[in-house]
Image (cartoon, rainbow, N blue to C red):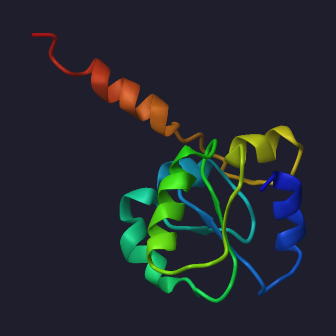
Amino acid sequence: FNVGELETALQKIGECQVVDVREKPEVSSEAIEGATNFPLSSFEKEMQKLDPDRPVYLLCRTGARSKDAAGHLERKGFREVYIVEGGIKEWVESGKPVIRSKSKAWSLERQVRFAAGTLPTE
């Protein structure tokens, strides 16, 4: 599923559920209007809020975490689960609109690198 198809699906208000599985700091820096944030770290609990009879479109930064979330939904019987290939990164690169925060949040990768850099070397 590509970002153009997602943009079309978003225009059908009430027919689809768009779920961003990135962590809250990532979503606070840029997000798609109309998307719900259920971070992958708490996805199993949050996914119970979704309607299994409506299509679910999953996105993250590039698509990897969306595949994990799709597996959770499919095991619970969701029939229409779509992974947005390229995620928010592709959405932004395609010039699609995003909601941006005035403060610059660190990406998850940058947070991990920072934390790893603070660990003792011995």
Q: Is residue 55 visible?
A: yes
Return the x and y of residue 27 as percentages of the image width and height. 58, 54
Residue 97 visible in the snapshot: no
Residue placed farthest to the left in the image? Answer: 122
Residue 38 in the figure: left or right of residue 86: left
Occupied quadrant, residue 83 = bottom right
Q: What quarter of the picture does the N terminus occupy? A: bottom right
From the viewer's side, name the closer residue of 64 and 27: 64
Left or right: 108 in relation to 90: left
Q: Residue lying farthest top?
A: 122
Relative placement, left or right, of 22 versus 18 is: left
For the point 67% across and 75% down, the residue is 80
Q: Quadrant of residue 64?
A: top right
Above or below residue 14? Residue 69 is above
Residue 59 placement, left or right of 112: right
Q: Which percent across, then down, holds residue 25? A: 49, 50
Q: x%, y% of residue 102? A: 66, 47
> How many labels, in total?
0
What x and y, as percent, mark residue 100? Answer: 71, 51
* Quadrant the C terminus occupies: top left
Q: Which residue is rendered at x = 47% and y = 32% of the image? A: 109
Q: Is residue 58 above or below residue 47?
A: above
Comparing 55 with 101, the one in front is 55
| Point 68% across, 85% down: residue | 54
